[in-house]
Image (spheres, rainbow, N blue to C red):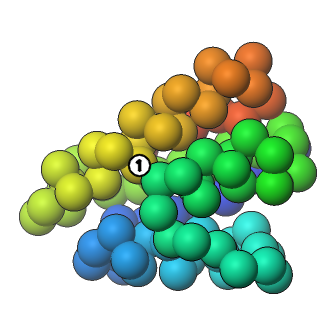
Amino acid sequence: MKMVSFDFHTIANVDEFYRQFVVKFAIEMQFGANLDALWDALTGMIDLPARITLRHLAEHKDAAQFDAIIAVMREAEEETAGNFSLRLR
């Protein structure tokens, strides 16, 4: 299982999250940096099984800006029958 962690002490905004996502999953093709592209990546582009851990999100000064990203990840958990999973720490 591929395990990837995002530390929200180093992620200021949604754009930075997407930049790190592309690097951590070594996505070489054009990535739209939006919710549709995230969905496509989680449900068909990245190798599964995979787990993403979001660290320190609750401490972020504007955590609400990531709500839609988390919602897409939760939906991907269901769509992939748990082959993709999300952890909040």
Which of the 4 image quadrants contains residue 12? bottom left
Relative to residue 19, is residue 50 drawn left or right? right
Residue at image x 47%, y 63%? 34
Q: Quadrant of the C terminus?
A: top left
Would residue 87 be visible to someone looking at this image?
no
The picture places residue 61, in percent across and down from the top left corner, at 11, 64
Relative to residue 87, is residue 67 drawn left or right? left
The picture places residue 82, in percent across and down from the top left corner, at 72, 22
Q: Residue furthest left?
A: 61
Residue at image x 41%, y 42%? 70
Relative to residue 8, is residue 64 drawn left or right? left
Which residue bears the numbered disc 1?
69
- Residue 12, above or below 74: below
- Residue 19, above or below 18: below
Would residue 15 be visible to someone looking at this image?
yes
Relative to residue 6, is residue 12 drawn left or right? left
Amino acid type, mark 1 = Ile
The picture places residue 20, in percent across and down from the top left corner, at 55, 77
Between 32 and 55, the residue placed more toward the observer is 32
Q: Residues within 10 Å of mark 1 (few under 14, many from 20)?
A: some
The picture places residue 40, in percent across and down from the top left corner, at 68, 50
Considering the numbered disc 1 on the image, is that residue within a helix, a strand or a loop? helix
- Residue 27, above or below 77: below
Residue at image x 60%, y 59%? 37
Which of the 4 image quadrants contains residue 62? bottom left
Which of the 4 image quadrants contains residue 55? bottom left
Q: Quadrant of the N terminus?
A: top right
Residue at image x 17%, y 50%? 64
- Residue 85, above or below 50: above
State how many labels appear. Answer: 1
